[in-house]
């Protein structure tokens, strides 16, 4: 004879948060820690994985709630090798020393006291000169930069992929070059810092763009 077994979690208000139903007579029962079942799921990211010393860069974090609809979170960023800490969700950093750094964020559901961690690794380089094309030893030119209504990318390979993301890593533009010079309109871009990635079969190049 089989039986039906139902397990539910009910909060203090009597609301059922989740229910699991099984058949048969299980030989074992497992009890999970509350934070394992309901704890947050953290994520950390950066628009690019490498920057120059002195660049202003933004670390981004996000979190997914498992059961709560409007939870409150606290954020704690740290990087021991860089001597960096922050309680902001998306802090800005200005690396001053070249090297490879791992930034760790701990996101805590303050009502449950449950937390999760995520990390992102950033390579900081000593870049010579102010021109990104010199940094990458490339003949690719982006002008005008800063841009207002439009800009050109010149000396690129036909068939290469052009991708532009904002400082939060959100893609705002992508296309395949049909000539060695491309004009891109920026009237739909918000003002701020963007990162252009130009990729062909041989290599990938990154260039910063300012939209005013």
Image: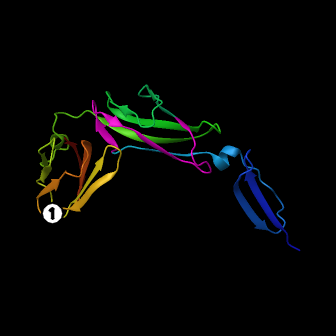
Camera-nearest residue between 148 and 151: 148
Residue 120, image quadrant: top left
Tell me which segment is drawn in magenta. 48-74
- Residue 20: x and y in percent read 72, 61
Left or right of residue 108, residue 146 in this image: left
Q: Is residue 68 visible?
A: yes
Residue matched to label 1:
158
Camera-nearest residue between 180 and 146: 146
Q: Residue at x 35, y 38 (%)?
A: 123
Compared to residue 160, the image places residue 142 above or below, namely above
Compared to residue 180, the image places residue 205 above or below, namely above
Residue at the bottom extreme of this rendering = 1
Q: Residues within 10 Å of mark 1 (few under 14, many from 20)?
A: some
- Residue 176: x and y in percent read 21, 63
Q: Quadrant of the N terminus?
A: bottom right
Q: Residue at x 66, y 44 (%)?
A: 35
Residue at the front extreme of this rendering = 13
Q: Is residue 201 visible?
A: no
Residue 2 within the segment the image draws in magenta: no
Label 1, secondary structure: give it.
loop
């Amino acid at each position: 004879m089989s039986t039906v077994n139902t397990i539910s979690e009910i909060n203090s208000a009597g609301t059922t948060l989740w229910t699991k139903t099984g058949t048969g007579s299980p030989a074992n029962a497992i009890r999970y820690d509350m934070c394992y079942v309901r704890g947050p799921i953290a994520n950390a990211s950066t628009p690019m994985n490498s920057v120059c010393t002195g660049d202003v860069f933004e670390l981004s974090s996000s979190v997914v709630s498992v059961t709560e609809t409007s939870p409150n979170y606290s954020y704690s960023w740290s990087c021991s090798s860089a001597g960096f800490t922050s309680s902001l969700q998306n802090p800005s950093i200005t690396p001053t020393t070249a090297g490879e750094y791992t930034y760790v964020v701990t996101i805590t559901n303050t009502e449950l006291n449950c937390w999760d961690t995520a990390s992102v690794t950033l390579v900081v380089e000593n870049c010579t000169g102010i021109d990104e094309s010199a940094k990458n030893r490339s003949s690719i030119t982006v002008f005008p930069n800063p841009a207002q209504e439009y800009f050109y990318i010149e000396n690129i390979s036909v068939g290469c992929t052009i991708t532009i993301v904002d400082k939060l890593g959100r893609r705002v533009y992508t296309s395949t070059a049909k000539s060695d010079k491309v004009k891109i309109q920026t009237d739909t871009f918000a003002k701020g810092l963007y990162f252009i990635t130009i990729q062909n079969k041989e290599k990938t190049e990154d260039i910063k763009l300012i939209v005013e």
